[in-house]
Image (cartoon, rainbow, N blue to C red):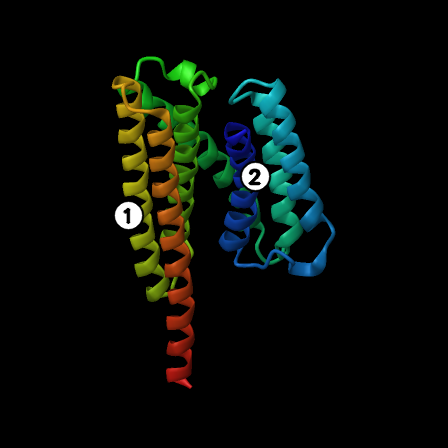
Amino acid sequence: MIYAIIEFFATCTDVLFMVWFITRFLNVSFISGNRPWNYILPISLLAFQLVADKFLPAFDIFSLLVALAISASYSISVSEWRRNKFSTLIAPCIFISVAMASGSAVYVIFSMFIDDIDAIMQGATENERIIYVLVSIIIRFILFKTILLLFKSRDSIDKKNGFFIIVCFALMAIGLGILMYTSVEYPIVKPSVVFALVMIITSSNFALYFLIYKLQKYRRKEYYLYIL
């Protein structure tokens, strides 16, 4: 049950990443223009990803092309096309490229230390598969966040907090990777203990992220009030 929920959560994060990254990259709002396609396209991507995860192999070229077409359509839907054509077209390409690169990087890194990584990817062991999925999501988030901070952020407060968040999530990914390696190489560790540690590490880091996000909003508001 938990495994199925994590898999569904991973698919949902792909859609959330598309909406979050493209809107931030184009500096627009999700409800920009109040067009129905702003809602229909993310739902379409979610539905397609759920079907593709079940019936198509990973990194299938057809899946990538459909995901690219949907993300490009979403980018055009929320953007000011006439004023910002280049960014509108490049944003979905970066999104798909990062998604592919992060998945390949996680697989390569884990395969260097764990022999039966393919079995884990197929869900042979539930806890290790959950860790693999979580690390993939974290690496994807780190890459997207880094791109936005380097090329789109002009706020010093946002940059400082952003890079601090990146470091925290990088440490989280390393911690989960070590936990996965320990669980595979030393099976005497109880699966319940591994699962509990995974949940503690994940929940604590996400709580830290939202805390920093709230503090960042407060500091920005305080700064604007000071200027006024």
Name the image quarter holding residue 121.
top left
Q: For this rendering, which residue is in front, 4 or 60?
A: 4
Q: Which mark is residue 182?
A: none
Q: For this rendering, which residue is in front, 128 or 39?
A: 128
Percent x, y for residue 178?
26, 30
Q: For this rendering, which residue is in front, 149 or 1?
A: 1
Real-space Cα distance between discs 1 and 2? 24 Å
Three-letter amino acid code at disc 2? Answer: Cys
The residue identified by callout 2 is 12
Name the image quarter holding residue 157.
bottom left
Percent x, y for residue 187?
29, 18
Residue 219 shows up from this direction: yes
* Quadrant that contains the C terminus: bottom left
For image coordinates 33% across by 65% down, the residue present is 156
Mark 1 or 2 closer to N-term?
Answer: 2
State the residue lying farthest toward the bottom. Answer: 228
Query: Is 129 positioned to the left or the right of 81 in the image?
Result: left
SS for callout 1 = helix
For image coordinates 32% across by 34% down, the residue present is 176
Does residue 89 sit above or below 2 in this rendering? below
The residue identified by callout 1 is 167
SS for callout 2 = helix
